[in-house]
Amino acid sequence: MLLKEIAPKHLFFILLLLVTSNTNAFSALPNNAVHLSQYHNRRVITTIRMTRAKQSSSSGTKSASKNTTKMKSNNVRWAIRGIAGEILHNVFLRQISRARKYLGTSKQQRLEEAKKVRLPIKNETALITGATGGIGSKMAHELAFRGYDVIIAARNADLGKDLVLDIQRELENSSSSTIKGTKQTPNISFMEYHADIHLSALDVASKLAVLNETKPLTVLINNAGIMGKAEQLSMKVNLLGPVTLTLALLPLMMKNCNDDKKNVKIINVSSSAHLRATGVFDEEDLRSSSKSLMNIFPDTKDEDLSTYAKSKLALLQFSTLLRHKLPKDNKIQVFDAHPGLVWTPLLRNHIGDKATNTLQKTGLASLIYKSPTEGSRALLAALDHPAGTSEEQLYFVNGQPGGFASPESRDLQQSQQLLDRLIAPELEGIVELPDGW
Ligand SMILES: *[C@@H]1O[C@H](CO)[C@@H](O)[C@H](O)[C@H]1NC(C)=O
Ligand SMILES: *[C@@H]1O[C@H](CO)[C@@H](O)[C@H](O)[C@H]1NC(C)=O
Ligand SMILES: *[C@@H]1O[C@H](CO)[C@@H](O)[C@H](O)[C@H]1NC(C)=O
Ligand SMILES: *[C@@H]1O[C@H](CO)[C@@H](O)[C@H](O)[C@H]1NC(C)=O
Ligand SMILES: *[C@@H]1O[C@H](CO)[C@@H](O)[C@H](O)[C@H]1NC(C)=O
Ligand SMILES: *[C@@H]1O[C@H](CO)[C@@H](O)[C@H](O)[C@H]1NC(C)=O
């Protein structure tokens, strides 16, 4: 019955959606959202950027759209090592660990445990992008309760400000369950940030540079992402956005990690969907003489979500590169994390009311899926992880280090190609690549 309702022809997309964490993913993004008015101070760069964007869209897009239909994919690998593993985790391992947690505890203790406990203030700032919905907003809550000052960097100011109020109220309300020395309340704030506009990342970075030094930025969570929108926009938001923001904030974060007590981390919200892609480009793309390969991603809708998969692979490749290129003595840790299958409002919207009701009535929803809070904890597990971990440990799945990341995502040569052929040309004149890249 269930299978009948979730029409088989949609199964593929449903599976994809199941593993998507960022619920923000689907938030309505105008296709050519360019709000440059607030960036007057950078008008010069803006102009260069707009001119280049125009050139590229007129020269490349049309011929490229035919070629992007072919994607070297690895759906079987993804179905087995991604989806099946995640279902098994949620259905069995998660239930066992829940049961173990409550075994032998009284009802009273359980209630205590369920109550939120605020940790003492940390005097550190965490920035999370795209956090106004779903798992992102839960992560913002969790960060605040861990004592971080939280900056919610997102597109929608109304939603962002509501979330700030929400977290502040919750922090105040939880004063009864604080632990010793938790009188001070972390500062929760909102900053407008558009992942598809490079200058917006620079704007955020310049605001952060003047933050009170007593609260250094130590945590950056690249959570914003989209799925199923125009292909080129997907690459912009899912890859170039986090790359620009990370590079713009890197000098500040490197400075902040000189203090041994600070735990400086960059966490990207990734997805097992990256297992579908065997490369961001194919041989033919690489033979192209265009300066930037952004042109191979047309402005048409990413129907089969292959560009989504590529953008997630590309992000992992960039992490690989970053780990490789950061000076050996620096203490920044770069993690990727995938929350597993999570029951989010957007997933429900997508599969429709009928399937949603069935999944809920039968209890399958809570059996197969994590709650958004569980999803956010699975991601934040990377934050609690001790320093000095080997490369294999740096991809977190279901809150555990050492998740299966594809060999392509660790391929230095492919990662370097990505940098040389797409990232570097796109970011030219916007943000400087560190020396030696
Ligand atoms: C698309 O593919 C055709 C043949 O497969 C090739 O001639 C053409 O150059 C390709 N276009 C782009 C933009 O890669
Ligand atoms: C944070 O700063 C406040 C005020 O400067 C101080 O009282 C508190 O001990 C500090 N907390 C930590 C964890 O350093
Ligand atoms: C605050 O706590 C009270 C009592 O525990 C609860 O009824 C109320 O919903 C809480 N408000 C918020 C905003 O969490
Ligand atoms: C809270 O953080 C924002 C930056 O995100 C800053 O502008 C503001 O001054 C901070 N407020 C306090 C009380 O520290
Ligand atoms: C920074 O924060 C500290 C402690 O909260 C405060 O005493 C100091 O005045 C602040 N400095 C600036 C420049 O806001
Ligand atoms: C997140 O992505 C950005 C941009 O690709 C990259 O600079 C950074 O290394 C990534 N971080 C992690 C933890 O993968």
Image: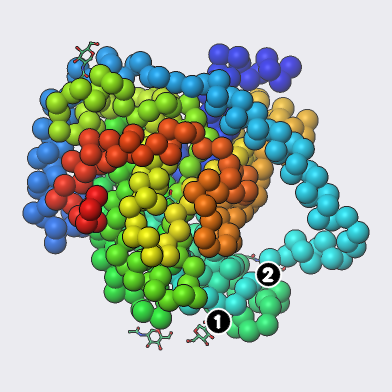
Task: Indicate the quadrant of ligand 5 in the picture.
Answer: bottom left
Q: Residue 69: horizontal and vertical position, in percent? A: 34, 16
Q: Is residue 147 above or below residue 71?
A: below
Q: How is the image coloured?
A: rainbow
Of the residues under marks 1 and 2, which one precedes in the sequence?
2
* Residue for point 53% across, 62% down: 387
Q: Say whether residue 27 is left or right of residue 44.
A: right
Quadrant including the N terminus: top right
* Residue for point 49% across, 33% down: 406
Q: As rendered, which of 194 and 348 lies closer to the eye?
A: 194
For the residue carrying disc 2, how many other residues have a C-alpha within 10 Å: few (<14), some (14-19), or many (20+)?
Answer: some
* Residue for point 49% across, 22% down: 74
Image mark for residue 419: none
Q: Say whether residue 273 is left or right of residue 415.
A: right
Q: Amino acid at mark 1?
A: Gln
Q: Residue 106: horizontal and vertical position, in percent? A: 90, 62
Question: Dot 2 lies on which element?
Answer: loop
For the residue carrying disc 1, how many other residues have a C-alpha within 10 Å: few (<14), some (14-19), or many (20+)?
Answer: few
Image mark for residue 117: 2
Q: Are marks 1 and 2 in contact (CB under 8 Å)?
A: no
**The image quarter in which residue 145 lies:** bottom right
Image mark for residue 184: 1
Say whether mark 2 is within 8 Å of ligand 3. Answer: no
Residue 195 in view (yes/no): no
Say whether mark 1 is within 8 Å of ligand 2. Answer: yes
Q: CA distance from mark 1 to mark 2?
A: 14 Å
**The image quarter in which residue 93 lies:** top right
Q: As rendered, which of 207 and 34 lies closer to the eye?
A: 207
Question: Dot 1 lies on which element?
Answer: loop
Q: Residue 360: horizontal and vertical position, in percent? A: 72, 34
Q: Amino acid at mark 2?
A: Val
**The image quarter in which residue 127 lies:** bottom left
